[in-house]
Amino acid sequence: MGLEGVGKLLLGGAVVLLVLGSVFLLLGRLGIDRLPGDLAFRRGNFTVYFPIGLMILLSIVGTIVLNVVFRR
């Protein structure tokens, strides 16, 4: 892969990150930042957050998208 290929790969990755960032900002403004199944533990000034519900949802969506893209 030459420098042109690396450049295209980096630009494509930047576009994907831009789209994902925009989607996450939009979802946060709509109030969909906490899903059922997300765990948050608070002790005084310390908080630990495990977004299990979000990870399950992203896994399902990612599986569907990859199956559609790489279908033969």
Image (cartoon, rainbow, N blue to C red):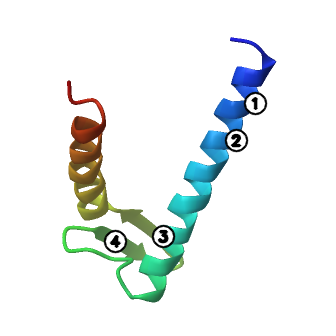
Using residue 72 as the reference point, say whether residue 54 is left or right of it: right
**Looking at the picture, does residue 62 appear above or below residue 46?**
above
Q: Earlier in the sequence, mark 1 or mark 4?
A: 1
Picture quarter containing residue 3?
top right
Q: Tell me the crowding category of disc 1: few under 14, some 14 to 19, or many 20 or more residues within 10 angstroms, Cα based.
A: few
Nearest to the eye among marks 4 and 3: give it: 3
CA–CA distance in space, label 4 to label 3: 19 Å
| Residue underneath mark 1 | 7
Q: Residue furthest front?
A: 72
Using residue 56 as the reference point, say whether residue 7 is left or right of it: right
Which residue type does callout 1 highlight?
Answer: Gly
| Residue underneath mark 4 | 40
Which residue type does callout 3 highlight?
Answer: Phe
Nearest to the eye among marks 1 and 3: give it: 1
Which residue type does callout 4 highlight?
Answer: Ala
Q: Tell me the crowding category of disc 4: few under 14, some 14 to 19, or many 20 or more residues within 10 angstroms, Cα based.
A: few
Looking at the rendered structure, the secondary structure element under dot 3 is helix
CA–CA distance in space, label 1 to label 4: 40 Å
